[in-house]
């Protein structure tokens, strides 16, 4: 393992620990879809990580040794986690687990939300792509699984927001993209 691997793994650990601490200040959920599956989601992420790290997939480990790719990967991880944190700050107490409805929710359309509707998801996916590029191609398994889950969550959350903010959300949805500015 290279030093960059430890740095990237450390960034992920710090990010998720900070995320868990920040969750303590979120508004109470009025309703949560799939809320009973929070433990299942965490277990899925842990299993994917262990499969990648423990070498359950046999064969040569596709560790990235090119310093340019490691640098690009590190930059993508920093940008992705930075975007997720920036978006989380703008959401404030409105943040919650995917597909949850908050008591007294507000429609946030400033900061990164003026460009994309789900910048937290975008940031985490971008950071995962960075880990794939900079550490190991096995990260692509997690990126694909997380990406599919986030697309599903963003679609479900869009329906919730349309119901919750029928006057303002449709215009906001037309003016922004789901995950990638100007594209998707």
Image (cartoon, grey):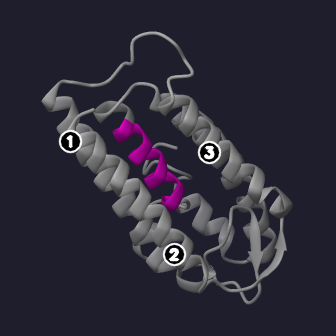
Viewer-side residue, 1 vs 166: 1
Judge whether 183 appears above or below 34 on screen.
above
Looking at the image, which residue is at 68% across and 66% down? 97
The alpha-carbon separation of the residues under discs 2 and 1 comes to: 39 Å
Mark 3 packing: few (<14 Cα in 10 Å), some, or many (20+)?
some
Q: Which mark is residue 109?
A: 2
Q: Earlier in the sequence, mark 2 or mark 1?
A: 1
Q: Secondary structure at mark 2?
A: loop
Looking at the image, which residue is at 29% across and 40% down? 5
Measured as percent of width and height from the top left, residue 64 is found at 27, 25
Viewer-side residue, 133 vs 20: 20
Looking at the image, which residue is at 53% across and 78% down? 22
Q: Which mark is residue 45?
A: 3
Looking at the image, which residue is at 61% across and 83% down? 24
Measured as percent of width and height from the top left, residue 77 is found at 33, 49
Name the image quarter holding residue 46. top right
Question: Range of the magenta residues?
Answer: 119-131
Give the residue pinned by disc 1.
3
Question: Given contact means CB atoms under 8 Å apart, are the residues at marks 2 and 1 in contact?
Answer: no
């Amino acid at each position: 393992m290279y030093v960059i691997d430890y740095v990237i793994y450390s960034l992920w650990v710090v990010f998720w620990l900070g995320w868990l601490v920040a969750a303590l200040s979120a508004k109470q959920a009025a309703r949560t879809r799939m809320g009973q599956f929070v433990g299942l989601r965490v277990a899925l992420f842990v299993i994917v990580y262990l499969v990648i790290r423990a070498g359950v997939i046999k064969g040569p480990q596709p560790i990235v040794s090119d310093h340019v790719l490691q640098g690009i990967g590190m930059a993508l991880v920093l940008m992705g986690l930075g975007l997720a944190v920036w978006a989380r700050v703008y959401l404030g107490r409105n943040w919650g687990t995917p597909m949850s409805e908050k008591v007294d929710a507000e429609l946030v359309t400033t900061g990164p939300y003026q460009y994309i509707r789900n910048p937290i998801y975008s940031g985490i996916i971008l950071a995962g792509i960075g880990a794939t590029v900079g550490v190991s191609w096995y990260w692509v398994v997690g990126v694909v699984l997380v990406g599919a889950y986030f697309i599903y969550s963003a679609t479900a959350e869009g329906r919730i927001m349309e119901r919750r903010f029928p006057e303002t959300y449709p215009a906001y949805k037309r003016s922004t993209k789901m995950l990638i500015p100007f594209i998707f």
